[in-house]
Image: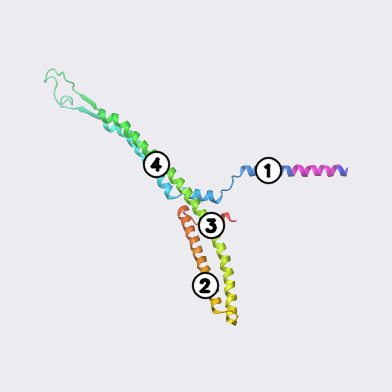
């Protein structure tokens, strides 16, 4: 009997774990994949004013198309002949028989302009196509630019890391040389050489720090938000 209970408990545990694994698998399928930092950078870059400007140009071109489509009505001129007789201001019996039309209505359509309107509409549509092409080019350039700047950031970050290690080693060598020089165990030339080596590496470190900050500013100019805050979101 105990064996049967143990077997039943084992089967329950196995089935329960299988259900949990299935639920976790289904949940992972339903949850949208998190964007990588590169994808987020591209997304932010494409939301910037440069792309919004191309969108506005496209809307402007589309408005021109709609205006050209509607302007064919400007070529239709309606005229009407109104006189004293047609307005019943004179007694028609006193004027005798009147054979001309009392009302003269006409429509004037300049054929040259009318048939040329389709060409103008086509030209306006070309403006929409040009705006679409310009937007595509702008998006491609922005994507390449922001990803290139991000690769520059990664490179400069690694260079600064290596330079910090080099500067730290040279600083340790300089402090040792300083102590030895104070006790007279090394010459001034040896102390001076250690000092110059450390200072040269310190200058490189400052330049790498500056380059890293500059590339951060360049990325922020493209994405329109703090790059450091974005990094923190993806480093949690």
Quadrant for residue 104, please give it: top left
Residues 212 and 118: in front is 212
Residue linked to disc 2: 196
Q: Earlier in the sequence, mark 1 or mark 3?
A: 1
Tell me: 10 left or right of 140. right
Q: Earlier in the sequence, mark 4 or mark 2?
A: 4
What's the magenta region?
A: 4-16
Closer to the eye: label 2 or 1? 2
Q: Earlier in the sequence, mark 3 or mark 2?
A: 3
Q: Would you say the residues marked 3 and 4 are in contact, meaning their CB atoms lie under 8 Å apart?
A: no
Q: Would you say the residues marked 1 and 4 are in contact, meaning their CB atoms lie under 8 Å apart?
A: no
Task: Work out which residue is located at the far right of the displayed protein and give it.
Answer: 1
Residue linked to disc 3: 155
Under tag 3, what secondary structure? helix
Distance CA(mark 4)–CA(mark 2):
58 Å
Q: Earlier in the sequence, mark 3 or mark 4?
A: 4
Under tag 2, what secondary structure? helix
**Magenta-span inclusion, residue 112:** no
Label at residue 23: 1
Distance CA(mark 2)–CA(mark 1):
64 Å
x, y percent for residue 177: 58, 76
Q: Would you say the residues marked 4 and 2 are in contact, meaning their CB atoms lie under 8 Å apart?
A: no
Closer to the eye: label 3 or 2? 2
Closer to the eye: label 1 or 4? 4
Tell me: 174 left or right of 3. left
Label at residue 131: 4
The image quadrant where one finds the C terminus is bottom right
């Amino acid at each position: 009997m105990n064996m049967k209970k143990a077997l039943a408990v084992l089967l329950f545990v196995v089935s329960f774990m299988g259900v949990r694994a299935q639920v976790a698998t289904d949940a992972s399928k339903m949850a949208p994949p998190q964007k990588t930092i590169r994808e987020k950078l591209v997304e932010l870059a494409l939301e910037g004013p440069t792309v919004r400007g191309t969108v506005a140009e496209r809307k402007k071109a589309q408005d021109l198309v709609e205006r050209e489509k509607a302007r064919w009505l400007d070529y239709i001129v309606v005229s009407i002949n109104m006189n004293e007789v047609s307005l019943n201001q004179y007694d028609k019996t006193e004027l005798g028989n009147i054979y001309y039309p009392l009302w003269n209505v006409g429509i004037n359509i300049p054929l040259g302009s009318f048939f040329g309107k389709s060409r103008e509409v086509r030209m306006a549509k070309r403006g929409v196509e040009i705006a679409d092409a310009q937007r595509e080019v702008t998006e491609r350039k922005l994507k390449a630019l922001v990803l290139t700047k991000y690769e520059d950031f990664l490179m400069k970050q690694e260079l600064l890391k290596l330079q910090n290690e080099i500067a730290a080693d040279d600083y340790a060598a300089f402090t040792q040389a300083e102590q030895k020089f104070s006790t007279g165990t090394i010459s001034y030339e040896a102390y001076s050489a250690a000092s110059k080596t450390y200072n040269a590496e310190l200058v490189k470190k400052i330049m790498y720090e500056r380059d890293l900050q500059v590339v951060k500013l360049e990325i922020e100019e493209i994405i329109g938000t703090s790059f450091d805050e974005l990094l923190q979101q993806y480093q949690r």
